[in-house]
Amino acid sequence: MKKLLLLAALSTLAACASGPRQSFPDRIINRALAGAPGQAQPSDVVATEIAFARLAREKGQWSAFAEYAADDGVMFVPEPVAAKSWLRGRANPAQSVAWQPHQVWMSCDGSLAVTKGAWQRPDGSNGYFTTVWQRQKDRTYRWVMDQGDALAQPLVEPEFIGTEVADCRAGREIAIATGLDLEIPARGAGRSLDGSLAYEWDVSLDRSRRFRVTMLLDGEMVEVLQLEVAPPAGSQ
C-alpha cells in the first residue's frame, strides 16, 4: 500500500515545476519529483520497476527478466553475459526473488535512469540490486544492465523512494555509443542522450566487479554511486 501511495504521489508531483537546487538530503528526496525541462519523469521508472517485480511474481522470474530486457542488455551470473541469450529458454525458479526500488537517478532528458534497491530470496537471503534503464522509441523503459550482490544485513526500506535528476546540459543532445566486451576481463559504459547521466562497469580476472554512476550537478559530472562486488567463492 505504501508503494502504491508513493507512486500516485510521484505522478501528481511530476506536473509541478522544479524549484531551486536543494541541499542533500532534501535534494535526493524531492528535487526530481517535479521532472525537469528535459522531460525526466522518475515516476515512470518507479512504475516500471514495480511492474517488473509484479510480473516476476505472476509469470516467473526469468520470464520477467527477458520481457523487460533491452536487446543489448547485460547481466552478471556472476560473469557478464548477453541477457537475451542467457535467458532464452531458461526455466523459472519455483518462486521468484522479490525486490523493491529505493533510489532513482535520472538524466535530465529522461533517456537513461539507474535504480538501486533491495531484494529478498525465498531462502531468506537478502541483497541489493542496481539496474540501468534506457528509454525506448515507444517511450517505455527496458533494462540494459542489471547487477547486485548479497548482503549480511538487509537494506533498510526508506520512507520514500529517493529520486534525483541531473542538471540539463546547454546545447544540442548528443548520442554516445556504449562500448561492451563480454570476455573476462570485461567492461562496459553508457551515457544518456544528453550526456547528463553516465555509468560504467568493469569485471576483473577474478570476477570481482565495480559499478559507477556519475551525473551532471552544478556544471560538473559528479559521482553519485560506486559499488564493488567481491569475487565469487572459489575464484582464482
Image: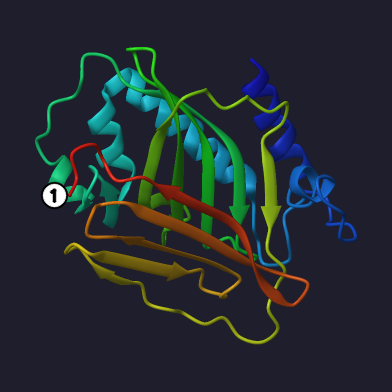
Q: Is residue 233 above or below residue 21?
A: above
Q: Nearer the viewer, residue 209 or 41?
A: 209
For disc 1, the neighbor class at 10 Å (few under 14, some 14 to 19, many from 20) is some
Look at the picture and state if 9 lies above or below 121: below
98 up-or-down from 19: above or below: above
Q: Residue furthest left?
A: 89
Point out the image quarter for the N terminus: top right
Q: Which element type, helix, strand or loop, lies under badge 1?
A: helix
Between residues 204 and 69, which one lies in front from this camera angle?
Answer: 204
Residue in view at x 57 percent, y 44 percent: 44
**Is residue 31 found left or right of 141 in the rendered image?**
right
Q: Viewer-proximal residue, 228 or 15?
A: 228
- Residue at 53% across, 45% down: 115
Tell me which colouring the rendered structure shows. rainbow
Which residue is situated farthest in the right direction here? 20
Can you name the residue that lies furthest to the bottom here?
171
Indicate the position of residue 89 as horizontal and vertical percent values: 9, 36
On the picture, is 9 further left or further right than 119? right
> Looking at the picture, how far across and down is residue 42, in whole percent?
63, 48
Residue 16 horizontal side relative to residue 233, left or right? right
User: In the image, what residue occupies the spot 12% across and 41% down?
Assistant: 88
Q: How many marks?
A: 1
Q: Quick check: 133 left or right of 178?
A: right
Which percent across, then down, holds residue 191? 48, 70
- Height in image: 123 above or below 77? above
Q: Position of residue 55 (x, y in %)?
A: 36, 26
| Residue at the image position 29 percent from the left and 46 percent from the top | 231
| Mark 1 lies on residue | 85
- At label 1, the amino acid type is Ser
* Residue 122 sits in quarter: top left
